[in-house]
Every structure is written in C-alpha cells, then in structure tokens.
Image: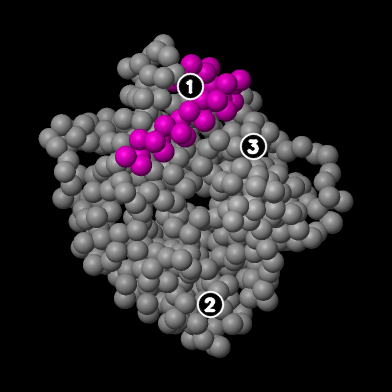
C-alpha cells in the first residue's frame, strides 16, 4: 500500500520537480494477422489494434485526471513486422500508421526486424522499405537488431543500416532528418521496451500487455541538492530512495491501467528519461554530483553510479521490472546534454564511453549531413560491440543533418527537442565495413 507520506511526496514531485509517467505502452501480438496478401495483413493488424487499444488514450487521460499524475504519452508496440509479412511490407506500414492515428497514440513501434544472426527474405524487404516508410508515415517507428551477446554482430546488417540511415535522412531532409529520429539500431534488443523509437512486442510476450515507462531526472537532481558535498555512499543511497518513490508511482499507474483496460500488466521500465525542458535533465544530475558540465572527466563514473542506484531502488518498488531501466542520455532530448554538446564538453567519443555504463546508447545525436554511410555503420558497429561484450542493450539513433555541418543546429520540436550538429571522426572505415560477415560472439556467451 502507498501511505499518506508517499502521497504528499508524489504531489511535490509532480508540482515542483517535473515528475511524470513518460508513457503507457500497450504491446499487441500480431502473429495471427499474417496473410499472403500484405493488404489483408495490414487490415487485420489495423482491426486488432483498434479493438484492443481503442480505449488506451481515454484510459490514460482518466487515470491522469483522477490521480493528478501527468501521463505524457500513450503508445502501442506490435510484433516485429518482418515476422508477419509475406510480401511487400509497405502496405502494412500504412495500415499501422492509420491505426495509430485512429486510436490517438503519438507513436506506434514495431516496424522492426531481428537480424542479429542473419536475415530472412522478409527482413531484407523490410530494411529496403524503411527510408520510404519513415518518410511517408507520421507515427510509425522502426528498429533493427543487428547483434547480441549470444550470436555476435551481423556486419552485413550493420553495413546495410548505415546506408539506410543515410537514405532516411535524405528522404526527410526537409524536417532535419526527422525520419532518423524514428529509427533505432540495437544490439541485445529487449522484447518489452515501452520507449520509442525502439519499442516492439517480442515473441516471448503475451497476446497483449500494459507496460509503463517512468521518468524523473528533476526529482533525482533536487534530492541530490540536499546532500551537496556528501560522500558517494550518501549520493547512491539518495538516488536509490528517490528511484523507489518514482517506481512506486509507475507501478500504481500500470496496475490501474491494466485493470481498467482488462489487459495483463507487463512491466515498469525504471528509466530516467529526460526532456528538453529545464529541470528535467540527466546531465544536470551529473553536474549536481560535482562536475562542471556533463562530459568532464568523471562523467562516466558518475553515470555508472546513477544507473546502478536507479536500478537498485526501482527493483524494490516493483516485482515486474523490465524494459531498459536506468539512465537515458539522448542528446537532443536533454537540455543539459544540449548545453554540454554546444560548449564542446561532450563529444561523440565521450558519449560512446558513457554508453558502456548507462541503459541505452548513442541516442538522438545530430551529425553532419555529409557523413559517409560507412562511417555511420562504423559507429553502429562500435556501439554493438559494447553491447555484445558487456551483455547489455546498446543502440544507435543518429541523425545525419543534410546540408548542415558541425556547429549548426537541428530542430525536431516536442519531446524530440533540438541539438547542435556534433563533429564525427573523418578517418575512413570503409574497408572495415566492406568485409561483411559476422563478428563472433564473445567467449563468455557460452554459458549453458
């Protein structure tokens, strides 16, 4: 039970510390929608999504009003489309985007393929369609898994994804490459991730499930303001206690949504997801620990402490923790990261080091539009290697800003924010990427 003290603490977090539930994401299994005719597959998917998720937005709004808890996004994730498509996947994409509009969610994830060990014909058809689909649809998100600790890294898929990111940026150049903001390349993708753009409903998931992603960087920062100068033991304990309170609210919302929709409760994702709003920044938490700015020496150590303490506090508050769970560092979606990148304190290489200890990867980073596809593939390969060797989820969501160079700025609006274009190492990795094949799994993957 949540006692009176927790209720008052929650009210303070909402009113003064930018606390919110970032998303209620309804996962829906579409395996039974597959048909030889892609139009029929899409129509079946549309009907099923509208039937199961038709009340999702209404229910989220009701809970938000009744409990006074902001619920920012209502979303849907579906079975990876490559698993249900027997032909051209583009008609399915159009039906999925239509379903997202019909039920009122802001994003629908699952235009995805799992290619960590190899590719099927359906995977290849989906990959080839991604730039066109993301340019033509508004609310559909795409993801591709190119590696795992058990399988290694599919370098053929890595090479293809560099080209696809580049083409997607070119096809959405009039919106600063917005299509790339809806495309994530994963290593060790999780099957119950409620956060876009990488959400999909994995094959191990039930017919449908309610997943909730919490947020609260502002809450953590303000808590740390009360222990300024204290040892790191105190810092870690403070973050743990704060993460516990945040997760309890997420658990409450998840169970309430589950009961009202008559859909099983899946997981709470503990992630600290920032926004471009002042006071809602992971980078500012790191600065509160004693760094002049995110990116300064000590940043990776500070982020490691934060990520671990968030997980430790969260798992005590909920028996069903999943998703990514930890600290996110998307550059364009975090005002402190934007400031640090603009000041030169934060570089692509430093961000890569930070991804070794956080919960995702190189996220929402604008790079020069003339960056070669092979260089983008090399960035993906490096990040996938971190995930593979460390047995953790890593991801790449970079936006080549067509016509722009380092120091320019891209604008996406809303939660996607804005960002300075960051410089990229100009030395070539073309011959490395051209090799293709598969980087073998590390020795510690043999654990049976």
Residue at 68% x, 63% y is: 117
Q: Is residue 119 visible?
A: yes
| Residue that sits furthest to the left in the current view | 4
**Nearest the eye: 163 or 2:** 2
Verify whether residue 299 appears in magenta: yes
Residue that label 1 marks? 287
Q: Residue 17: x and y, percent? A: 31, 31
Left or right: residue 437 versus residue 301 is right
Distance, label 2 to label 1, CA atoms, is 46 Å
Label 3 crowd bin: few (<14), some (14–19), many (20+), radius 10 Å: some
* Vertical side of 78 occupied by 298: above or below: above
Bounds of the magenta segment:
287-316
Residue at 44% x, 26% y is: 285
Q: Earlier in the sequence, mark 3 or mark 2?
A: 2
Magenta stretch, main secondary structure, is: helix
**Nearest the eye: 53 or 315:** 315
Q: Residue 343: x and y, percent? A: 60, 24
Verify whether residue 266 appears in magenta: no
Using the image, tell me which numbered label, if any, was put on residue 84. 2
Q: Earlier in the sequence, mark 2 or mark 1?
A: 2
For label 1, the SS is helix
Residue that label 3 marks? 352
Distance, label 3 to label 1, CA atoms, is 19 Å
For label 2, the SS is loop
| Residue that sits furthest to the bottom in the current view | 36
Residue at 80% x, 59% y is: 436
Q: Residue 123: x and y, percent? A: 64, 71
Q: Nearer the viewer, mark 3 or mark 1?
A: 3
Label 2 crowd bin: few (<14), some (14–19), many (20+), radius 10 Å: many
């Amino acid at each position: 039970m949540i006692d009176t003290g927790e209720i008052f603490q929650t009210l303070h977090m909402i009113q003064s510390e930018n606390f919110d539930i970032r998303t209620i994401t309804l996962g829906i299994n579409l395996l039974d929608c597959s048909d030889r005719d892609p139009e029929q597959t899409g129509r079946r998917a549309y009907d099923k999504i509208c039937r199961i998720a038709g009340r999702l937005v209404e229910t989220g709004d009701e809970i938000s009003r009744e409990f006074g808890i902001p619920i920012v996004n209502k979303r849907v994730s579906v079975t990876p489309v490559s698993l249900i498509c027997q032909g051209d996947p583009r008609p399915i994409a159009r039906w999925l985007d239509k379903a997202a509009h019909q039920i009122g969610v802001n994003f629908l994830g699952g235009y995805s393929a799992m290619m960590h060990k190899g590719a099927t014909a359906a995977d290849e058809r989906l990959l080839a369609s991604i730039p066109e689909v993301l340019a033509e649809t508004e609310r559909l998100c795409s993801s591709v898994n190119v590696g795992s600790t058990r399988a290694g890294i599919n370098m053929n898929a890595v090479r293809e994804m560099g080209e696809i990111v580049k083409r997607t940026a070119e096809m959405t150049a009039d919106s600063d490459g917005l299509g790339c903001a809806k495309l994530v390349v994963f290593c060790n993708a999780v099957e119950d991730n409620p956060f876009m753009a990488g959400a999909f409903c994995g094959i191990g998931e039930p017919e449908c499930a309610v997943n909730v992603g919490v947020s609260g960087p502002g809450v953590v920062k303000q808590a740390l303001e009360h222990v300024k100068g204290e040892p790191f033991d105190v810092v870690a304990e403070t973050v743990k206690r704060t993460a516990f309170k945040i997760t309890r609210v997420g658990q409450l919302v998840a169970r309430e949504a589950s009961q009202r929709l008559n859909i099983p409760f899946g997981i709470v994702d503990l992630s600290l997801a920032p926004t471009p709003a002042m006071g809602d920044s992971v980078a500012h938490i790191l600065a509160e620990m004693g760094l002049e700015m995110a990116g300064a020496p000590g940043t990776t150590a500070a982020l490691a402490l934060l990520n671990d303490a968030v997980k430790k506090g969260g798992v005590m508050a909920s028996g069903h923790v999943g998703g990514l769970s930890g600290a996110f560092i998307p550059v364009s979606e975090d005002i402190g990261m934007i400031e640090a990148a603009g000041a030169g304190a934060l570089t692509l290489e430093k961000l890569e080091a930070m991804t070794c200890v956080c919960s995702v990867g190189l996220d929402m980073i604008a790079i020069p539009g003339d960056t070669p596809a092979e260089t983008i593939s090399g960035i993906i390969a490096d990040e996938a290697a971190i995930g593979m060797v460390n047995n953790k989820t890593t991801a790449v969501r970079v936006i080549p800003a067509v016509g722009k160079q380092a120091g320019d700025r891209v604008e996406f609006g809303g939660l996607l924010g804005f960002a300075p274009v960051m410089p990229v190492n100009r030395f070539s990795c073309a011959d490395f990427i051209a090799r293709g094949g598969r980087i073998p799994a590390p020795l510690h993957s043999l654990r049976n």
